[in-house]
Image (spheres, grey):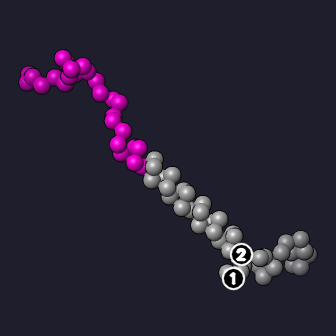
Amino acid sequence: MSKLNNGEPSLNKIDDYNGNESKQKRNIVRLVVILCLVVGGIFAYLKTTSAPSDYVGTKEQSGINTTKN
């Protein structure tokens, strides 16, 4: 089994294991998460405020037949 793990680091050798990450890496992760939330919020706002473009008809004829048969 030791022959298989020769080239791979163990978890204890990784810098970010067990909360040992640097402040710079932690701040970059926070910045990316906040940026994704802001971009998602902008897309959600634009989607909810956009007018639907699937209107069929004109002002004179709405395209809806309201007469009973």
Residue 57 located left or right of residue 66: right
Residue 4 shows in this picture: no
Identity of the residue drawn at 69% across and 70% down: 24
| Residue type highlighted by circle 1 | Asn
Residue 8 located left or right of residue 62: right
Q: Residues within 10 Å of mark 1 (few under 14, many from 20)?
A: few
Spot occupied by residue 27 in the image (x, y as percentages of width and height):
63, 69
Question: Which contiguous range is marked in magenta?
Answer: 44-69
Which residue does the numbered mark 1 point to in the structure image? Answer: 18
CA separation in Å, label 1 and label 2: 12 Å
Spot occupied by residue 8 in the image (x, y as percentages of width and height):
85, 72
Question: Residue 50 got which mark?
Answer: none
Question: Residue 22 got which mark?
Answer: 2
Spot occupied by residue 38 in the image (x, y as percentages of width and height):
49, 55
Please tell me whether residue 3 belongs to the stretch shown in magenta: no
Q: Is residue 39 above or below residue 2?
A: above
Quarter of the image for the C terminus: give it.
Answer: top left
Please tell me whether residue 46 belongs to the stretch shown in magenta: yes
Identity of the residue drawn at 19% across and 18% down: 61
Q: What is the quadrant of residue 29 in the picture?
A: bottom right
Q: Residues within 10 Å of mark 2 (few under 14, many from 20)?
A: few
Identity of the residue drawn at 33% across and 29% down: 54
